[in-house]
Amino acid sequence: MLTVETIRKIRLSVHRDGKSIRQTARDLHLSRNTVRKVIRVQETAFHYKRSNQPGPKLGPFMEALDALMEEDEKLPKRLRRTAQMLFEELQLNGYNGGYDSVRRYVRRWRKERRTLSEKVFIPLIFEPGEAFQFDWSHEWVELGGMRCKVKVVHLRLCNSRLFLCVAYPRETQDMVFDAHIRAFKFFDGVCRKGIYDNLKTVVNKILGGKERNFNSRFIQICSHYLFEPISCTPAAGWEKGQVENQVGLVRRRFFTPKIKVKDFRELNEILQEQCINWAKTHKHPAQSDKTVWEVYEEEKPFLMNLPPLFDGYAERPARVTPSSLVTYDRNRYSVDFLLLHANFALNPVGLSVAKSQSVFKGLGFQIGA
C-alpha cells in the first residue's frame, strides 16, 4: 500500500522536477504502473478498503459463531463473551485459523446488529393540563455558614413548561408529599397525570411492562388530587426528558454561583422567586412568540381545581418493644407504658395519640411482651 510520503515524492518528481515516469520509477524503486496511477489522479492519499473479506478457514464455523453471539445478545453486557473467548471456544471445536479473522467478523456482526436495533425517539407532545413530571437532584449550597448537599425536587408542567424547585434535607416520602402540595398550590391546579421514576417512596415493585405496585400511601395522595401516576421504563429517561433537562438548567442557572442562605425556608423562597422570573423572561420552546408564563396562563383553566389540603404524613409499621420504645426513621421514641393500650399514629416528626383502635392496628403496632 502506498504511503502518503511515497505519493508526495512521486508527485514532486513528475510535476515539479519534470522527470519522466521511467526515471521516477527507477529512482524510487517503484513500478511504472504505480507511478502512472499516482500522477493520473489528484489524490494525495490512497485508502484501500476490501469489499469482501475472504474467510477460507472461518467459513465453516460462521454458523456456530453466529449462534454463540446470538446467545450472548440475550445476556447483560457484562456477561457476554469477548472476541478472544469466542476464538478460544471455536478452537475447541476444531477451528485452526487466526484470531484476527474472528475479531473482524465479531466486530462487523455487532456493528450490523447495533444498526438494525437503533432506537428512534419521537418528541412527546402534551395537551394543556395533561401531565406533570417529577424528579430529584442533588445540589450544593452554603446553609447556615456550612457547605452541604441538599435534595431538590423538580415538578414541571409538560405543556407550559412552568416548573417549581423545592429543597429538602432528605428524600423521604413525607417530603415527596410536601413537594406535591407546594407545587399544586404554586400551579393553582392539578394535572390529570404525573410521570415519575421508579422511586422507592413511590413504587414498591416493578411488574411487567408499565404495571407497577405503587406504595399505598402514595396512591392515597394520587386519589386525593385525582391524578394518575405513570412510572417510566427503567433506564429510559427520555420518557420524562423535560424534567431531566431541567435538572441541568437549574444547576447552571440557580445554583451557580453557590447559594448562601440561613435555612431551608429562605432557600425555597429564593428558588420559587427564580422559577417565576425564569418563566416570565424566557420564551416557550414550542411557541416562540410567547413566554413560558403566558403559556401557563393559557393552560391554567385546563388544570383541575385544588381539593382540601392533603395530610402528607409518612406511614410505617412499627413495634413497641418491651422497653417501651418505638423506632421510626432511625430514631427511637419512648412511649408511656400506661398508654400502650391507647392508639398511636406516626407523623413526620414523631408520635401522637390517636383515638381509634382500628388506626392503631392499621399502622402495624404490636405491643411487646
Image (cartoon, rainbow, N blue to C red):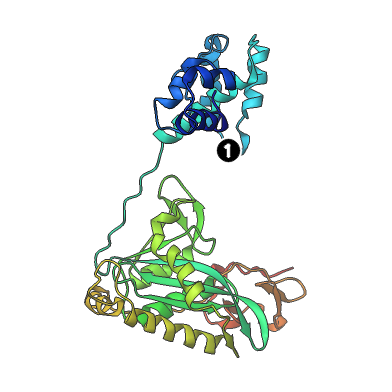
Confirm whether residue 163 shows in the render.
yes
The residue at the point 46 percent across, 79 percent down is 311
Kindly tell me whether residue 67 is visible in this rendering: no
Would you name the residue on which mark 1 appears? 77
The percent coordinates of residue 43 (x first, y second) are 43, 32
Residue 344 point in image, percent of width and height: 59, 78
Camera-nearest residue between 62 and 336: 62
280 relative position to 338: left or right: left
Give the residue drawn at x 48%, y 88%.
269
In x, y percent, where is residue 191? 31, 70
Q: Residues within 10 Å of mark 1 (few under 14, many from 20)?
A: few
* Residue 301 quadrant: bottom left
Q: Is residue 182 above or below residue 138?
A: below
Q: Position of residue 90 (x, y in %)?
A: 63, 16
Using the image, determine if residue 190 lies above or below residue 87.
below
Q: Quadrant of the C terminus?
A: bottom right
Residue type marked 1? Lys
Residue at image position (66%, 25%) is 85
Residue lying at the far right in this picture: please name it: 323
Secondary structure, mark 1, is helix
Q: Nearer the viewer, residue 44 or 217?
A: 44
